[in-house]
Image: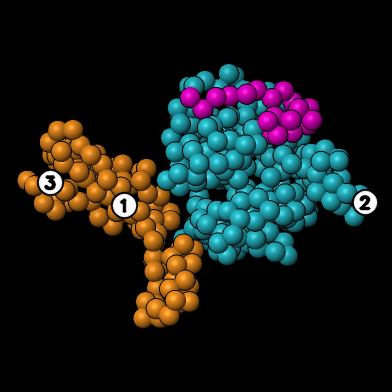
Amino acid sequence: MPTIVVEVMPKAVLLDPQGKAVTGALHRLGKAQFSEVRIGKRFELTVDGPVDDALLAEVQTLADDMFSNSVIEDVVSITVLDDAHQDQA
Amino acid sequence: MRVGVITFPGSLDDRDAQRAVRIAGAEPVALWHGEHDLHGVDAIVLPGGFSYGDYLRCGAIAAHSPIMSEVIDAANAGMPVLGICNGFQMLAEAHLLDGGLIRNDHGNFICRDQRLQVENISTAWTNGFQQDQEITIPLKNGEGGFIADQETINRLEGEGQVVFRYVEVNPNGSLNDIAGVSNARGNVVGLMPHPEHAVEEGFGPDTRLAMRSGTDGLTFFTSAIASFVSA
């Protein structure tokens, strides 16, 4: 069954307190080469049936309206994982 | 006057809000998130808590609840709607209020008696205050940082839609110390602190006069009653 992957990140201009906390932990471990960590979300939607343009349009709407909040986040990618549908977006 | 308080899975302060409505002199009506029915109420409170465990984003799943379509219609028709804490997050997620709430900038949950300045006394929920009155009510949140883009901030400030501002301490990194905002019409108000926990002597924040005697939150609810009576 195909899987559609939606990735959402906090807006670049906004503080990402989770990422900031992990950045601090890395630095305490001596990993100062990583200047910043930002943490986002990955949604994996398993689909019963074929993935067509109409379904991808619906996923785009869901990604914009529900999986993300455009005030604080950006949808950075929508990808189809399937033998027959590599990296469609 | 009948004031509906909607209970969502994970709401915590719904009964406190009902109690505040009762103490203010109105009739509380318990509403359920899964219904498409406001039971004819005259105003609505979206209470605090952790609806759906704060999954996805705080208030995001609750904002898609069945009853929210009726809440959105009622709000757009002018009904007074108050969102407290998680309820504020729901109103932002439902786009009834501008901006968004993110994790506190210091990363910790915070619980304190919080001083606020009331900067807009023309809303349905603040008309009983005096302009720039300072009040103290409890605050308790982990994701109360109010943010919006600069254009939105400028508009909220310019149009007087910043209803409450944190005084002395900004407890969560909110832009411009914003604690609560309204929609343009002033019938929909959301804030992170909890007025419903400061409505009865003996159970509120400490004041200079006596322990736990603070009742500054009561005016939110008596304001809604006053705006209903005068309407």
Query: Could you say which chain is coloured cyan in the image?
Result: B
Q: Position of residue A65 (x, y in %)?
A: 36, 43
Q: Nearer the viewer, residue A35 or A88?
A: A35
Residue B84 part of the magenta-drawn span: no
Residue type, label 2: Leu
The chain letter under disc 1 is A
Query: Could you say which chain is coloured orange in the image?
Result: A
Asked whether the viewer can see residue B230, the reply is no
Residue annotated with mark 1 = A42
| Closer mark to the observer between disc 3 and disc 2 | 3
Bin the neighbour count of mark 3 within 10 Å (Cα to Cα): few under 14, some 14-19, many 20 and up.
some
Label 3 vs label 1: CA separation? Answer: 17 Å
Residue annotated with mark 2 = B209
Viewed as shown, does residue B143 lie left or right of A18? right
Name the residue: 48% across, 31% down. B68
Name the residue: 16% across, 48% down. A81
Bin the neighbour count of mark 2 within 10 Å (Cα to Cα): few under 14, some 14-19, many 20 and up.
few
Q: Earlier in the sequence, mark 3 or mark 1?
A: 1
Which contiguous range is marked in magenta?
B15-34
In what element is the residue under mark 2? Answer: loop
Residue annotated with mark 3 = A82
Viewed as shown, does residue A61 lie left or right of B127? left
